[in-house]
Image (cartoon, helix red, strand yellow):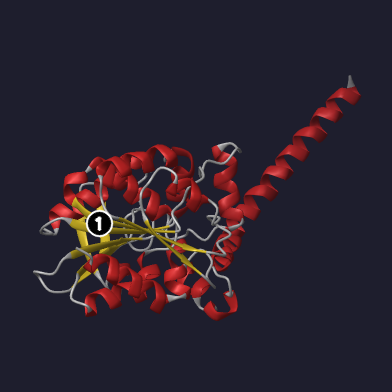
């Protein structure tokens, strides 16, 4: 009996010590220490607008009567991912909108389910609140490509043309339990940031990319937004592309030939069910609009100008 008691005490001690170590490791690596407030946003470029699910950080420029182009970023990098394309299209007379999805950048991080409804509602609210006129052109990169495909299927009467850049195709849903993924995202936050360089063919040419990514990770809710998206955003890419094809909208599909994030072979899967103007980009990985801006932006402009 004495041996049993000692064994139980040892087990309890080991479990408690392990829990303390895991918690300490979590606290040491967890970057989310602050709540995003109006004070934090005072010195941030762009504008802010209150929508039905929270405040959204956005930038809108170009002539009032210009044709509207909306640029939607990917899974976790906020709207700065579109810097070059945004400036290029504004200079060419388009009225261009880019924004941070909920949970990213300097938009609110509501503690809610990050599913198709949330993302589609945010974009619809934004179009309505900003009173954007006429049919809009949508451009989405990576996860943003999947998101705008679903939005265009839901609101085809609002859409003129669709531009997909290396769109997400495989499901984001991990096989591990959700709580494990939440913990993993916290203790491997540095890896999450550094892995953004994997989207480039020549990462050394984009040495400042990680530094730009880090600030959004300091605010509570970023990790929840990513993990909820992984588990709650139902990604049925083939069905979504079939739906977009039925909407009969002009679609430009741009893909970096060396993409290791959304492999180039998925372009074949998309084109098997969706009629597109296909534009492969040599010498580029997952972000061809960043790595080959002149080539990609010229193609986007030509596509938008087509009658």
Residue 39 placement (x, y as % from top left): 29, 68
Q: Position of residue 261 (x, y in %)?
A: 55, 57
13 is higher (above) or lower (below) than 159 = above
Q: Position of residue 288 (x, y in %)?
A: 46, 69
**Residue annotated with mark 1:** 161
Residue 221 placement (x, y as % from top left): 42, 52
Q: Secondary structure at mark 1?
A: strand
Question: Who's the residue at 86% across and 29% down the image?
Answer: 6
Residue 112 visible in image: no
Taking depth in this image into account, of 170 and 249 the one nearest to the observer is 249
The quarter of the rendered structure image containing the C terminus is: bottom left
Residue 281, compared with residue 208, is above or below; it is above
Q: Residue at x 9, y 70 (%)?
A: 64
Q: Is residue 241 above or below residue 133?
A: above
Residue 236, quarter of picture: top left
Which image quadrant: the N terminus? top right
Q: Quadrant of residue 199?
A: bottom right
Q: Is residue 11 visible?
A: yes
């Amino acid at each position: 009996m004495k041996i049993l008691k000692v064994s139980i005490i040892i087990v309890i001690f080991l479990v408690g010590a392990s829990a303390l170590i895991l918690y300490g490791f979590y606290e040491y690596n967890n970057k989310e220490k602050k709540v995003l407030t109006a004070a934090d946003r005072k010195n941030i470029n762009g504008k802010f607008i209150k929508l039905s699910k929270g405040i959204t950080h956005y930038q809108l420029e170009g002539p009032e009567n210009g044709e509207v182009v909306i640029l939607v970023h990917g899974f976790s990098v906020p709207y700065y991912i579109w810097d070059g394309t945004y400036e290029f299209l504004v200079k060419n007379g388009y009225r261009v909108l880019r924004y941070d999805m909920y949970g990213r950048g300097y938009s609110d991080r509501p503690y809610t389910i990050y599913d198709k409804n949330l993302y589609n509602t945010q974009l619809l609210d934004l179009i309505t609140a900003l009173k954007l006129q006429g049919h809009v052109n949508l451009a989405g990169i990576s996860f943003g490509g999947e998101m705008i495909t679903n939005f265009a299927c839901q609101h085809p009467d609002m859409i003129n043309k669709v531009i997909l850049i290396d769109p997400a195709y495989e499901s984001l849903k991990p096989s591990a339990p959700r709580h494990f993924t939440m913990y993993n995202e916290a203790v491997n936050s540095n890896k999450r940031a550094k892995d953004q360089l994997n989207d480039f063919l020549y990462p050394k040419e984009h040495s400042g990319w990680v530094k730009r990514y880090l600030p959004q990770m300091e605010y509570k809710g970023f990790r929840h937004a990513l993990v909820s998206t992984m588990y709650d955003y139902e990604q049925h890419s083939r069905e979504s592309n079939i739906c977009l094809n039925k909407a009969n909208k002009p679609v430009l599909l741009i893909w970096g030939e060396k993409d290791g994030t959304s492999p180039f072979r998925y372009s074949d899967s998309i084109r098997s069910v969706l009629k597109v103007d296909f534009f492969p980009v040599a010498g580029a990985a997952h972000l061809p609009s960043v790595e080959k801006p002149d080539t990609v932006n010229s193609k986007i402009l030509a596509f938008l100008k087509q009658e």
